[in-house]
Image (cartoon, rainbow, N blue to C red):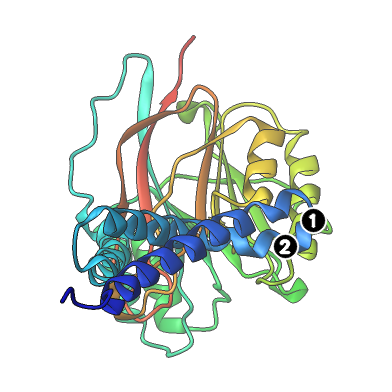
Amino acid sequence: MRPPAPKRLRRDWSGALVGLCIGLAGLALTRLGWLRIQLDVFSAFTIQAAILALASFLGLLLPRFKTLAASVLFVLGIVAYGLWPSLQVAADDAVPDGAKRIRIATFNIDDEDGHAAPRLASIEKLDADIIVLTEYDGSDADFASGIAKLYPHLLACDQSTGCDVAIASRYPLASQDGYSGIQGPSAVAARLGPDYANLLIVGVHTSHVPNTTLQFEELSALSKRLGTEHGPMIVTGDFNATSQSRLVQDFGKSLDLTQAATLPTFPAYFGLPQLAIDQMMVSSGIVKLGPQTGGSAAGSDHIPIARSFAIPTSR
């Protein structure tokens, strides 16, 4: 007599199939921000939804152990994505003729524990010429003195307004007025000299999710202010939104900026960040040199990211 239909096979199919449906539904949810900005919060999980959908689809292709395979592939995908920032080791490309190299970093230092030394060591290892610090208030004397040794030029925004962004540089900075007063995010801006084509560096820290409506208003105000600027520009900092979000994409398109950092940076616990909410965008003409690089969180809930660029200095 033929054995009864194996329920185990149906269960084997069902788990992977449910995973595929959840992954595809998640991907659909990530696009809802284009219909209503309040729903843009779901875009933060685009990568995770895509990993789940792909892992489940591949599991369904296998003859046996479909759900187990899908589960293992999903976990491996999540771990691999979280490890990505620590695997960026390639050297920078050569600097094109008529351009100068500059290395830019951004780091939400989240310095609530008062342990300055690990964060300073992480920053020094990045070897950036300029670093944008978010959640910086200057209250930690050890960190402030340490950053001054690494970067003799520091420009912080008006902290009496609640702004918590600073630009630390190896090169002299010229402050740009009109940013702390806008109805936008915490922001500070400075220009380098003619040697770097008067490059404008803008540090940004938007409000936290799920306040996507406020974030949208903040970035719209900042975009309007930046629209009055001229010359090469790099905008970086903690946007509290990923590059898949309408918030970031609208902001970049409004200023014709190109995304230069896509590494996951948050949350940095267990060394497996999953959300790429620290952004770096550059104007046309600025050339990316080599890969983006992640650093050590050193106790922060973010990891720092850095990248080298070639700034055209001659026409």
Which residue is denoted by mark 2 in the rendering? 39
User: Helix, strand, or loop for circle 1?
Assistant: loop
Q: Which residue is mark 1?
A: 36
Q: Is residue 132 left or right of residue 148?
A: right
| Residue 227, position as x, y percentages in the image | 76, 34
Look at label 1 and name its amino acid. Answer: Arg
Q: Quadrant of residue 268?
A: bottom left
Residue that appears at 43% across and 47% down: 261
Which of these two is toward me, 164 or 33? 33
**Residue 155 visible in image:** no
- Please indicate whether residue 110 sits to the left or right of residue 81 in the image: right
Pick whichever, 130 or 82, lies toward us. 82
- The residue depicted at 26 percent of the width and 65 percent of the height is 66
Residue at x 20%, y 55% (from the top left corner): 87
Indicate left or right for 307 with 225 as reference. Answer: left
Quadrant of the rendered structure where residue 120 is?
Answer: bottom left
The one nearer the camera, 235 or 41, is 41
Q: Secondary structure at mark 2?
A: helix
Tell which residue pokes out farthest to the bottom in this image.
113
